Each structure stands twice: as C-alpha cells, then as structure tokens.
Image (spheres, helix red, strand yellow):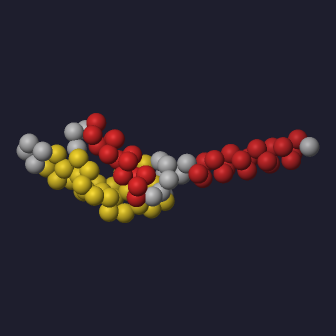
Amino acid sequence: MTRLSSLALGLIFASAVAAQAACVVEYKAKRDNPLELFYEVAQVGGDCTVADATARLQKRLQRDGLTLLKVLSVRKK
C-alpha cells in the first residue's frame, strides 16, 4: 500500500511540474527617450501560448521601463 501511495504521489508531482514547465519566448521591446530597441529571449512560466507569454512579459518589461513590441515565438523549454 505504501509503495502504491508513493508512486501515485510521484506521478501527481511530476504532472504538476510538467504543467508549470518553462517556456522560452523570443520578443522585441523598446524604451523611449532615447529610443532603444531590444531583441531578447526570456524564460517565463505558465501556458506556452503567445497570449499568456505576452501578458507575463508585459508585466515584467514594464518594471524595467520597457514596452513589448512583439512576441516572435514561444516554445517549451
């Protein structure tokens, strides 16, 4: 019984970790005054969709005074 419980718990944990797998996002951003353009690759959590990556990146970039211009690609790490 203990071995089965440990196995089940391990599978649940592995599923949770896989669901939170990191995504690699290529994007373009800018900063004004003076104008600076950036091409970067970042790692974000959450769903590996363009919409989710865009939302997460916008929040992160705003803290640095940057404006997200475009998400170029999103892929699982």
Q: Quadrant of residue 65?
A: top left
Q: Residue furthest right?
A: 1
Q: Compare residues 56 and 26 and report the one nearer the observer.
A: 56
Task: Kindly give the residue lying farthest to the top in the view shown.
Answer: 63
The residue located at (55%, 48%) in the rendering is 20
* The N terminus - image quarter: top right
Is 54 left, or right, of 18 in this rendering?
A: left
| Residue 60 as seen in the image, left or right of residue 3 | left
- State the image coordinates of residue 57 (x, y, percent, origin top left): 35, 47
Residue visible at 22% across and 44% down in the picture: 66
Is residue 26 left or right of 30 when viewed as pictured?
A: right
For the image shown, how many numbered marks are present on the structure? Answer: 0
Residue at the location (67% across, 50% down)? 14
Residue 35 x, y percent position in the rendering:
10, 48
Q: Horizontally, is 42 left or right of 10 in the view?
A: left
Q: Nearer the viewer, residue 77 or 71?
A: 71
Tell me residue 12's x, y (percent): 71, 47
Q: Residue 38: x and y, percent?
A: 21, 53
Q: Can residue 11 be seen here?
A: yes
**Residue sitting farthest toward the left:** 34
**Residue under the point 47% across and 47% down:** 45
Camera sees residue 43: no
